[in-house]
Image (cartoon, grey):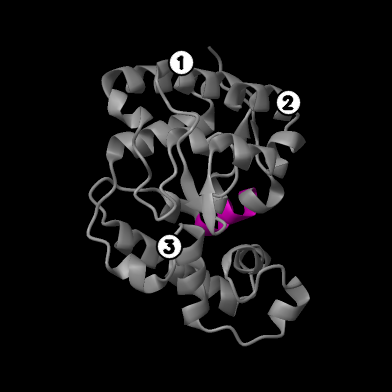
């Protein structure tokens, strides 16, 4: 199977470029250490008024949700805004919750996510065969998303909200292999299934795959 084409919204692409290699998740790195690196990088973006970072803030920081970028530019945002935004983006209620973490990444889960978001069906299928527990495993992040939730391109960390053109096949593969469509993730102040999140996400619509994805996830 050839490489999948991937729909990546402009903001998501800008975020990916801004954080660059910091988005990699080395297997031996503690989660809180990784998120702190991202928060420090975000603060640099705040100081330079990086537009993508300001959009990240108005998407995730509870005090600035939906605030116009122009208004955010006029504020003197401190380092604590960066730390709180990263905490919320990764599903934690506060930075203190991040600091209490004593966990490292599961390399297999992170690899599976990489294959999913790249549309690498064959590699993902092989990995799931080797590590079937991944089908029911939840992210180490506060939102506790499963692999299936990531097919919805909503609620998870912004930089991972992209849609490979074979996402319908990937969702079908996960379900056929044993993933539960009834699993919940914690986001937006509640608990949501992958279908509920996909239904309210603009990305599957913009990628032209919404009806087919909904049919599989429902």
Q: Quadrant of the C terminus?
A: top right
**Does the magenta-highlighted stretch encompass residue 141?**
no
190 horizontally vs 29: left or right: right
Q: Position of residue 7 (x, y in %)?
A: 67, 35
Asked whether the beta carbons under mark 2 and mark 3 sit within 8 Å of each other, the answer is: no
Which sits earlier in the primary sequence, circle 1 or circle 3?
3
Q: Residues within 10 Å of mark 1 (few under 14, many from 20)?
A: few
| Numbered mark located on residue 92 in the image | 3
Residue underneath mark 1: 176
Vertical placement of 26 versus 164: above or below? below
Asked whether the beta carbons under mark 1 and mark 3 sit within 8 Å of each other, the answer is: no
The magenta segment is 13-19
| Numbered mark located on residue 211 in the image | 2
Q: Position of residue 122 (x, y in %)?
A: 44, 16
Residue that sits furthest to the bottom in the current view? 76
Q: Where is residue 77 in the image (x, y as percent from the top left)?
A: 58, 83
Cα separation, mark 2 vs mark 3, equals 31 Å
Q: Which of 142 and 8 is in front in this view?
A: 142
4 horizontally vs 103: left or right: right
Query: Which quadrant would residue 100 be assigned to in this image?
Result: bottom left
Tell me the SS state at disc 3.
Answer: loop
Which sits earlier in the primary sequence, circle 2 or circle 3?
3
Q: Can residue 162 be seen in this view?
A: no
Q: Which of 211 and 72 is in front in this view?
A: 211
Vertical placement of 87 versus 136: above or below? below
Q: Can residue 42 be seen in this view?
A: yes
């Amino acid at each position: 199977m050839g490489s999948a084409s991937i729909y990546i919204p402009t903001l998501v692409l800008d975020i990916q470029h801004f954080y660059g290699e910091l988005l990699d998740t080395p297997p031996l790195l503690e989660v809180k250490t990784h998120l702190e690196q991202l928060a420090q990088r975000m603060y640099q973006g705040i100081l330079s008024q990086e537009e993508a970072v300001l959009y990240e803030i108005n998407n995730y920081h509870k005090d600035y949700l939906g605030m116009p970028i122009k208004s955010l530019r006029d504020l003197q945002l401190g380092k604590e805004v960066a730390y709180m935004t990263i905490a919320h983006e990764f599903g934690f209620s506060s930075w203190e919750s991040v600091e209490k973490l004593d966990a490292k990444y599961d390399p297999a889960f992170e690899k599976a996510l990489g294959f999913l978001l790249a549309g690498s069906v064959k590699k993902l299928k092989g990995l799931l065969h080797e590590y079937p527990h991944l089908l029911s495993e939840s992210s180490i992040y506060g939102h506790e998303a499963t692999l299936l939730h990531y097919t919805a391109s909503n609620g998870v960390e912004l930089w991972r909200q992209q849609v490979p053109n074979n996402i319908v096949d990937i969702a079908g593969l996960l379900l056929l292999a044993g993933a539960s469509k009834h699993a919940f993730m914690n986001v937006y102040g509640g608990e949501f299934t992958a279908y509920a999140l996909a239904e309210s996400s603009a990305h599957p619509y913009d990628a032209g795959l919404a009806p087919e994805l909904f049919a599989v996830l429902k």
